[in-house]
Structures are given as structure tokens and as C-alpha cells.
Amino acid sequence: MYEDKTLICKECGKEFIFSAGEQEFYAEKGLTNEPQRCKECRDARKKAIRAARETFTGVCAKCGGEATVPFKPRDDRPIYCSSCLEELKASGEYPSKKVEE
């Protein structure tokens, strides 16, 4: 049903392939616009955005190590390093959304 398309990157001007598989993925997700940047330019853009984000450090509430988070920590809420956070999520101990009672 889908065929590979050759598109032009609006950032660098190089040609790139919008594969049939990518087109199918876009359709499944309900995305109607074709990509406008090649993978290299998309990755560079994401990296620049991440680098511009402010991060904060604090002490992990589980292991006591350094935790880097994208928000300013508050004294009344624990923060976790990425390793401990993954462990808590895997065990089901960390709620994915705040629950109000």
C-alpha cells in the first residue's frame, strides 16, 4: 500500500527517504504531515532542545546518590535518580500519575 518517498530536508536541503514502514507508522498514529527534516537534522534539533533545558540536582530519596531532574525539587516531595526511578516503576511502587483523594 505504501511506497518509499524521497523528500527534501527543509533544514539542510538533502534528500532523505520517507520509507513505507515510516508512512504506515505515521498513519497508525494519526499523523497527517510528512516529516520535513532528515533524521540527522531531527536528532540535532532534539539534542539542542534538550541541552537548553534547565536541570536541577538533589539527593535521591532511595539510594542517597545524586539525582538530576528537570524541575526544581521541593522539600515535601522525594526525588529519585534515574536508576532508582526505573526500579520503582518496574516494581509498581511509583505511581505514574498523581492521585488526588
Image (spheres, helix red, strand yellow):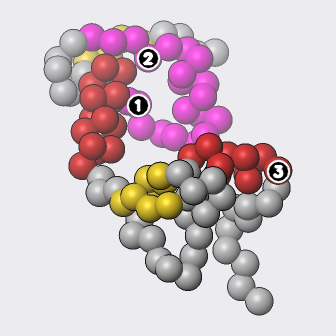
Magenta highlight on residue 17 = yes
On the image, the x and y values in percent for residue 35 come to 38, 30
**Which one is nearer the viewer's eye here, 68 or 45?**
68
Quarter-of-image position of residue 78: bottom right
Query: Residue flagged by tag 2: what amino acid is it?
Result: Phe
Rendered image: mark on residue 18:
2
What range is drawn magenta here?
A: 15-37
On the image, the x and y values in percent for residue 55 come to 34, 56
Q: At 47% across and 77% down in the image, what residue appears?
A: 74
Q: Is residue 53 visible?
A: yes
- Contact (Cβ within 8 Å) of mark 2 with mark 1: yes
Query: Residue flagged by tag 3: what amino acid is it?
Result: Ser
Q: Is residue 36 visible?
A: no
Q: CA distance from mark 2 to mark 3?
A: 39 Å
Q: At 57% across and 56% down in the image, what residue appears?
A: 64
Q: Quadrant of the N terminus?
A: top right
- Contact (Cβ within 8 Å) of mark 1 with mark 3: no
